[in-house]
Image (tube, rainbow, N blue to C red):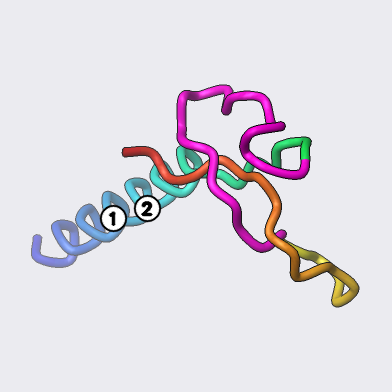
Amino acid sequence: MKLLFALTLLLTVICASMTMAASDEYIHLPGKSCADAPPCPDNRPCVMAPPRCNVGTCGKNPVPTCGKRT
């Protein structure tokens, strides 16, 4: 019974963290600054942040992105 409760609790934590990650997904906006960029599609604030990269050849200059939900 304790094992079943522990597994249920673990699955709940995993599902909750996956949901939070999906709601704050990275969105790179077009433009050079937040003033040039269109609004975020889900009403999050625009913030200037370093770009995320999959390869080591990315720039370090901040780009407009959608920030975290408030």
Prevailing secondary structure of the magenta residues: loop
**Residue positioned most to the front:** 35
Q: Quadrant of the C terminus?
A: top left
For the N terminus, the quadrant is bottom left
Outermost residue, right direction?
Answer: 57
x, y percentage for residue 63?
70, 52
In the rendered image, residue 12, in percent from the top left (x then y), is placed at: 27, 49
Q: What is the crowding at mark 1: few (fewer than 14 residues within 10 Å), some, or many (at least 20)?
A: few
What are the residue bounds of the magenta stretch?
Answer: 32-51
Judging depth in this view, the residue of 34 and 22 nearest the camera is 34
Using the rendered view, name the quadrant where residue 29 is placed. Answer: top right
Residue at image point 61% right, 47% down: 26
Residue 3 colored in magenta in the image = no
Q: Which residue is mark 2?
A: 17
Under mark 2, the amino acid is: Ser
Seen in the image, is 57 located left or right of residue 65?
A: right
**Residue drawn at (80%, 65%), measured in percent from left and top?**
54
CB within 8 Å, label 2 to label 1: yes
Q: CA distance from mark 2 to mark 1?
A: 6 Å
Q: Nearer the viewer, residue 35 or 28?
A: 35
Tell me, yes or no, whether the highlighted magenta stretch contains residue 48.
yes
In-image side of 15 versus 37 (left or right): left
Q: Residue at x 74, y 64 (%)?
A: 61
Above or below, comparing residue 61 to residue 29 in the picture: below
Q: Percent x, y for residue 27?
A: 64, 41
Picture quadrant where residue 57 is located: bottom right
Instruction: Decide: is 12 above or below 23.
Output: below
Q: Residue 66: where, in percent of width, then height? A: 56, 40
Q: Secondary structure at mark 2?
A: helix
Residue 13 image label: 1
